[in-house]
Image (cartoon, rainbow, N blue to C red):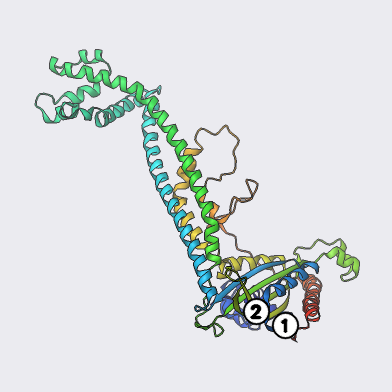
Amino acid sequence: MVASISQIIGKINPELYAKNGKELLKKYGSIDEIPAEEIDAKNLAEHLLVYDSSSETLEPVYFFILDLMNSLGHPPEKLVDNFASSPGSGHFQELGTRATIMQQQSSKILGDVNMVLRSILNIIFDLRDFKTRLQSYEDLHSEEKSKTGGAKLSLKQIWMDKVDIAKGNSSIKAMALGQAGFQTLIDAFLVADTEKDVDKIDLNDRIKRILKPRVHEFNIWLKQSEGELRKRYEIEKTYLKSQVNSLKLYSRWARPYLKAAQDLEMKETSREPEIVKAFNTIVLELALLGKSKLKTEDSALEGDLPKEFQKMKMRKEYYSCILVEFKFRGIPQRAGGQQSHYVFGGRAEITFKAYALSDDEIKKMNEELEDSDVSNVLKLIEGSTTESLAQLQDDINFFLEENSEEKPKQKDQSNPFMALIGAYDNGPEKKEKKSSGEKTKIILKPDNWIEKNHLRALVSKKAIDTAFLIFDVYKKAHGMPSYT
């Protein structure tokens, strides 16, 4: 069961907006532990409008109230937008087809994302190998003899394993391990650095004739391979950057399809009595929250607050809030013949609720909404992708930022999966978001005497008056029967 907006507000301030607030606080100990579904919600004031007409649609009702709230200084924010169609209706089939198209398209793009991700894994593996080998070349040029000697021995082993082994039975290892009389060949090769060194070693002429060309070949390979390896290393880093950018691009392409697919999902209505499988019915649920900030200086000048409030610095801001909830039960009818657009006539129930909330309570409400199914946007996608990429991010940053210490440091935007949740939509000036593990919980401070008896009391009165005003204006403008 998904908690309603009223229940979430009741959880945030159970003393004011929950009938059973004291019992739940006693039972669970803190508001964070209280399940919002158990809240028996209440408000400062509530008004109900009911209108039933098969010829009238919901759009005029919705937009009239939307514009009215804006004109009264309570710009609304949409918190809930759910719908459910009966399985037997044409509307169900129409939106089901659209949802399937969005799901297929997003699935295709995510398949491309997985392919690029596998490519990045392979590139990082190659870069690590190149980095290890390049370290041997760097140690070879070191002034420390111990490093130089160890690096040359390491490179000789690589040459025998990667280059000389291609000669088959005539390779150094094959001859030393498989043919009699050549047991000293590997040790001699590791000791000799030049052809002159071969002459100084106590070996028979047969071994020397085999060893000299191998030492000569190794020295040529040593000079050429370092330059080629560094060139390949830089190319691989460029390719890694290209693949990361492609991954970010694919992720951004996938985002609107994933969002659209979720928006087209219908609300679970297995026990909803208004949804009958064989009927042609739709149920819509909308919720708008409009809020107006209390300006203490203006209120003090107008006489609503004592004059001392003109110069006082408040520790919290307070808002008069109007929650407008729409519940619409209608019959979808195709408009304009064969066009894939529907109009809905039916019964509309509009509830106007008044609340007085502080800025901390509003932030807490938004936090609760993010944690609930009410605004569950791409949560599963975000969790699965960011977690998988977190293991690679350090390696990606290491290779992409290498040799760039002297360049001015810019904000890292290389994490492609953050694009899925719109982390880079506002450009580099946007502040970095904390990861879910670093998310700071909002702690609500209780009202002091001034806040309780002056600020919250005033915004409560304004909220009650505004809720009734919106209700009354709409009722008089449309002549709708009302119940308060």
Q: Which mark is residue 368?
A: none
Tally the numbered discs. Answer: 2
Name above or below for residue 19 compared with residue 67: below
The type of residue carrying mark 1 is Leu
The type of residue carrying mark 2 is Gly
* Residue placed under numbered mark 1 in the picture: 49
Q: In this view, does 462 lie to the left or right of 38?
A: right
Q: Is residue 442 left or right of residue 185?
A: right
Q: Which of 124 and 420 is in front in this view?
A: 420
Name above or below for residue 135 compared with residue 120: above
Within-10-Å neighbours for mark 1: few <14, some 14–19, many 20+: some
Q: Is mark 2 on a helix, strand or loop?
A: strand
Please provide percent x and percent y for residue 223.
Answer: 35, 21
Q: What element carries label 1?
A: strand
Q: Quadrant of residue 267?
A: bottom right
* Marks 2 and 1, how far apart at CA: 16 Å
Residue 141: tell me if it is visible. Answer: yes
* Residue placed under numbered mark 2 in the picture: 345
Residue 4: tell me if it is visible. Answer: no
Please provide percent x and percent y for residue 162.
Answer: 27, 31
Pick whichever of labels 2 and 1 is earlier in the sequence.
1
Q: In this view, does 306 lie to the left or right of 58?
A: right
Q: Nearer the viewer, residue 71 or 31?
A: 71
Going 60% across and 60% down the picture, which residue do you hit? 440
